[in-house]
Amino acid sequence: MQTSVPDELIQSLGLHNMAGRSQPAERQYESTMDVLPTMPHSLAMQFSKSGSYDKRQILSVVDDDVSVRESLPDLLGEFGFAARAFSSAQEFLSSGCVDDTGCLILDIAMPGMSGPELYQELKRRGQEIPTIFITGQRDETIRARLLKQGAIEFLLKPLNDEALVAAIRTALQAN
C-alpha cells in the first residue's frame, strides 16, 4: 500500500531536516498494515533474519499531542523502525506493551503522570526501558537530571531527524 507524507506534515512535527530533500513534495513509502486492529497507530513489527519478530525492537511513543501520536510512528517507519503511540502514561502502562518496548520516546509535559514520573515508575517496577525524552520546553535543570538518571537523550522540539534516529539507535543498542 502506497502512502504519501506531505512535507507540511513533516514540518508540523518539527522534522525539518526531512523536508525539502531532493524528492517530490510528497514522498512515497511502503506501509505494512497487517497489525492488530486494537493498535491503530502501530506499524508492523520488524522481522529478524530468522523470520521471527524481535519484540524488544518496538518503539513506543507517549505524547499527549495527537499530531505527534499520529505522525511520528509513520515517520519512524520510514527509517525502518516499528512504532506505536499512546496518549498518556496511564494508557502506556495499562496497554500490556511495556515488556515489548525496546525504546521509549517520551514527552516531558503531559496531563496526569508526566514523562519523568512515568520514567521513574518504570524504574520502580524494574522495567528499565531506554528512554528518549522530547519536549518543546528548554530546561537545562530537567535535562541534566534526566540524563544523570539514565535517559538516552533529551531532544527539543522541533525535532532534528538525524539526532532522533541516532538516539534511537543508541537506545536499541543499549537494550
Image: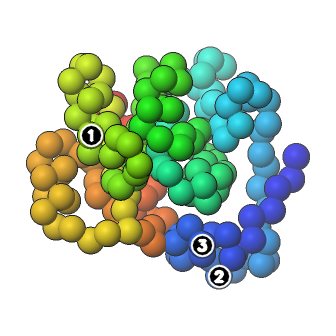
* Left-right relation of 128 to 141: right
Instruction: Give, as a three-letter code, the residue at label 1.
Output: Glu
Can you give x and y, in whole percent of width and height, for residue 157 in the image? 42, 69
Can you give x and y, in whole percent of width and height, for residue 170 in the image? 34, 46
Instruction: Give, as a three-letter code, the residue at label 2.
Output: Gly
Q: In the rendered view, tell whether residue 117 sits above or below residue 38.
A: below
In-front residue for pair 34/170: 34
In-front residue for pair 136/21: 136
Mark 2 and mark 3 residues within 8 Å of each other at the beta carbon? no
SS category of the residue bearing label 3: helix
Q: What's the residue at 26%, 29% (across, down)? A: 121
Q: Which residue is mark 2?
A: 20
Q: Which residue is mark 3?
A: 12
Q: What's the residue at 65%, 82% (across, down)? A: 20
Q: Which residue is mark 1?
A: 117
Answer few, some or many: residues within 10 Å of disc 2's Cα (few below 14, many 20 plus, some between 14 and 19).
Answer: some
Can you give x and y, in whole percent of width and height, for residue 129 in the image? 33, 32
In-front residue for pair 166/14: 14
* Left-right relation of 89 to 82: left
SS category of the residue bearing label 2: loop
Tell me the quadrant of the picture where the C terminus can be found. Answer: top left
Q: Which mark is residue 19?
A: none
Rounded to the nearest angstrom, the CA distance separating label 1 from label 3 is 27 Å
Among numbered discs 1 and 3, the one appearing first in the sequence = 3
Rounded to the nearest angstrom, the CA distance separating label 2 from label 3 is 13 Å
Instruction: Give, as a three-letter code, the residue at label 3.
Output: Ser
Q: What's the residue at 23%, 34% (across, down)? A: 120
